[in-house]
Image: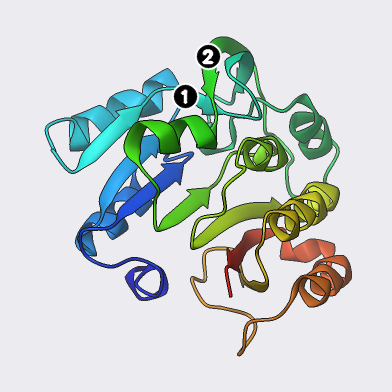
Amino acid sequence: MDRLYGGFVRRGELVFDIGAHVGDRVASFRRLGARVVAVEPQPALAKVLKLFYGRSAEVSIETEAVGRSAGTISMMINIDNPTVSSASPAFVAAACEAPGWEGQRWIKSVTVPVTTLDALIDKYGTPAFIKIDVEGLEEEALAGLTRAVAALSFEFTTIQRDIALACVERCIAIGYTRFNAALGETQTFTHAKWVDGREITRWLIALPGTANSGDIYAALA
């Protein structure tokens, strides 16, 4: 993880971790010497982040979701597996019908505030890298970013391939020209060289459903 993110982040630079969960990426960014804005709307996971990083001057914790506009949203909580809690009804519906997701249950909901990536940039400054992992809300999060930063990543799932394709289109629209991907938690790029938007789109379309999930990386020229 440090090797991968070290290609995007230098000591002293700012990173946004959108969907920070319990902070495994925060830990990696801090090992690299970055300052981190950790955004996590789930109250239980936000408590964990505050326990680990609440006293760190280099980590700011925002307890809200990220979308295309400010407001509020209902978040569906998976108590047994909170890392797949989601504010996207379409994600929950797709997961409930998908092989490999058997037994997942979203049995609680909570209303959380919503901010945007642009608003976070206004508040904290421009990050060197943005990591987005928001369980089906990736397209909404990118819709709230109108100024491209040097690089970003967003999670994709094969149960919502259309969301990933829309995210690639959004990245192209705001200026990103170089793309790569990592499957699952491998932290290893699948392409030896960065590819353009058309090529990463073809790769996403051809990816078998059994691949399940991963991250797409987008960078400026």
* Spatial separation of the CA atoms under disc 2 and disc 1: 6 Å
Q: Amino acid at mark 2?
A: Val
Q: Which quarter shows the N terminus?
A: bottom left
On screen, residue 145 versus residue 18, left or right, reads: right
Colouring method of the image: rainbow
- Which mark, by number, is residue 41? 1
* Mark 2 surroundings: few (<14), some (14-19) or many (≥20) residues within 10 A: some
Q: Amino acid at mark 1?
A: Pro
Q: Earlier in the sequence, mark 2 or mark 1?
A: 1
Query: Is the residue 182 above or below the residue 213 in the image?
Result: below
Percent across and percent down for residue 153 are 56, 58
* Mark 1 surroundings: few (<14), some (14-19) or many (≥20) residues within 10 A: many
Say which of 118 and 100 sits in front: 118
- What secondary structure is found at the residue carrying circle 2? strand
Q: Quarter of the image holding residue 39?
A: top left
Percent across and percent down for residue 143 are 69, 38
Give the residue displayed 64% in from the left and 63% down from the top. 216
- Which mark, by number, is residue 141? none
Q: Quarter of the image holding residue 71?
A: top right
For the question of whether residue 81 can be seen, the reply is: no
Instruction: For the residues labelled 2 and 1, say whether their Cβ atoms are less than 8 Å apart.
Output: yes
Q: Which residue is mark 2?
A: 112
